[in-house]
Amino acid sequence: MTAATAAGEGEAQSQVTGFGTKRYRTYVLSALTLIYIMNFVDRGLLAVVGPDLVPELGITDTQFGLLTGFGFALLYTFVGIPLARYADVAHRVWIMTVCVALWSLMTALCGLATEVTIGSLTIGAFWILLMCRVGVGIGEAGCTPPANSLIADYYAPRDRSQALGVYSMGVTLGTMFANLIGGWVTDAFDWRTAFFVVGLPGLLVAIVFKLTVKEPPRGYTDPKGRGATERVSLREAIRELTTKPAFWLMTAGATVAAFCGYGISSFQSIFLVRTHEITTGEAAIWINTPVSLSSAVGTFAVGWLATKVYKRHPGAIAWVPGLGLALSIPFYVFAFTTQSLLFAAIGLIIGGFVKYGYITAQYTIGQGVVSMRVRAMATAVLLFVANLIGYGFGPLFIGAISDAFFVSGAADLGIAAEELSRNQCHPSVVGELSGDLQNVCGQVYAQSLQSAMVIMACLYAASSSFFLLTWRRLGRDMVDRNQDPIPVPR
C-alpha cells in the first residue's frame, strides 16, 4: 500500500468517524454539554430567584425584563461576532476556558449586588446587578460558536445532528438545574447565596476542561478539497450567507422562538408565584424543574428522530420543529389561563416537550448550509440575531406589557399609577394597604402578567411558519456532500 493510498484511506476514515476514539469523542461531547448546561444555569438563575429579588430590590417588571433580557444580551451578541471570527482560526479550547471562568466569576458577583455610595454618587443595586449581568453576557458569548466548531471536527456529518442534539440539551437541562438548585437554595437561604452556589464551581470546570480536552485539526471531518483553513473575512462570510435563504428563514424562526421562549422562561417563576401563591422554591422545584426536564427530552428527541429518518426524510430537521412549535401554542395558552396549578404544570410540560426541537434544528441547519471555514461565523450570526432580538427584547416585551396592563387595569378601577405600584401588592406588604387598594391588587396583580404570557405564547405561530418555509429551501442550500439532496416540498 502506497503512502498516498494510506493517507487517502486515513482521511476517508476521519470523515466517517471524526477525531479521536469513540470513547474520547463521547467525553468531549459530555464536557461541552456540561459547559453549555452551566451556561444556562448561570444565565437562567436570575429568572428563578426573581420572585424574591424583585420585591427586595423594588424593581418593576420592565426593569426585571431588562435584567434578564437586554442587559445580558446586548454585549453577549456584539462580543459573539469577534469571538466567533477568532474561533475560526484560533485555539477554541483556550477561548472556551477563559470565557467559562469569566462568566462563572461574574455570576457569583451578582450575589453581591447592593446599593453603593462613592463620594456623593449613589449607585443603586439595580445598576450593580445590571453591570454583573453584562459581564456574564460577555463571558457566555465565547461558548457556543467554538463549541459548535469543535463538534463539527469531532463528529462526522452523519453523526453531527445527533451530537448537536445532545449538546443542545444544555439549554433545557441548564434551565432545569437552575431551578432545582436555585429554587432550593433561595428557600433555604436567600437569592444572593444561590448566585454564589451556582457560579463559583465554574472556575474549577474551566481548569479541568483545558487540561483534558484536545484541540482537533480544523476541518478534520470535511471531504478532501473542501476548502482551506485560512481566516475568512466577515464580508466573505456574510456574502456566502446571503446566498442561503434557508439560513435566514431558519434564523427568523429561531429568533421568534427565542423571543417567545426567553420571555416566557424569564417570567415563569414570577407568574407561578403571583397566580398560584406558592413560594419561589416550590415554583422552581415542583413546576419548573419537570418542565425543563421534559423540554430537554424533547430537544434530544428531535436530534435523534432526524438521525433515524435521515435517509428517507432529511427535511424533517426543519418541518418537525415547525410542527412542534405550532403544537405548543394551545398547551401554553391553557397553562397560563387555568386556575389549577396541576393543569398549569401539565400544559407547561407538554408545551416544552414539543417546542424545543428547534434548537437542534437551528444548529444543524446553520452548520449544514455553509462551508467549513465559516461554520463558527454562521453560528455567531445566528446567535447574534436570535439573542439580540429574541433574548434581548423577549423578556423586556413581557415586562413592559405586564406593567402596562397593571397600570391600565388599576386605572379602570379608578386608581392612578402614582397611588399604587406593583410591589405594594406583594403578599408580604399588601396587608398594609387600604381595603380598596387590596381589592385592586387582587384583580390586576397576577392578571396583568398572565395576559402578557398568553400574548407571547400565541407568537409561536410565526416561528412555526418560518421553519416550514425553511423546509422548502433546504434541498437547494445544503452544501455537505455527505448528505443526500433534501427533497423540496411541492
Image (tube, rainbow, N blue to C red):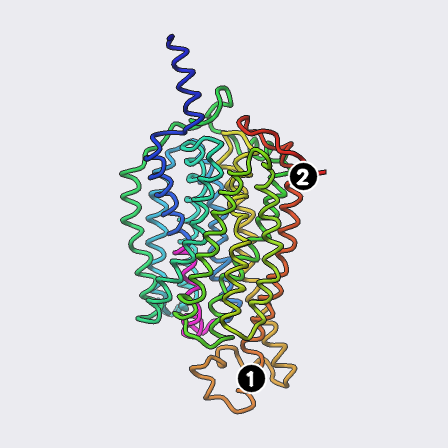
Category of crowding for the residue at label 1, using alpha-carbon neighbours closer than 10 angstroms: few (below 14), some (14–19), many (at least 20): few
Q: In the image, what residue occupies the spot 55% across and 75% down? A: 339
For image coordinates 55% across by 54% down, the residue present is 354
Q: Quadrant of the N terminus?
A: top left
Residue 268 located within the stretch drawn in magenta? no
Position of residue 479 relative to residue 60, above or below, is above
Q: Which residue is mark 2?
A: 472
Q: Main secondary structure of the magenta part?
A: helix
Residue under circle 1?
Answer: 419
Residue depth check, mark 1 versus mark 2: number of the one nearer the observer? 2
- Residue 372: x and y in percent read 50, 29
330 above or below 316? below
Q: What segment is highlighted magenta in the picture? A: 41-59
Query: In the rendering, at what x and y percent does residue 11 appear?
Result: 42, 20
Q: Is residue 101 left or right of residue 408?
A: left
Q: Left or right: where does residue 221 sit relative to residue 119? A: right
Q: Provide residue 154's location: percent of width, then percent of height.
A: 40, 32
Q: Residue at x 54, y 57 (%)?
A: 261
Q: Residue furthest right?
A: 490
Kind of residue sitting beneath label 2 = Arg
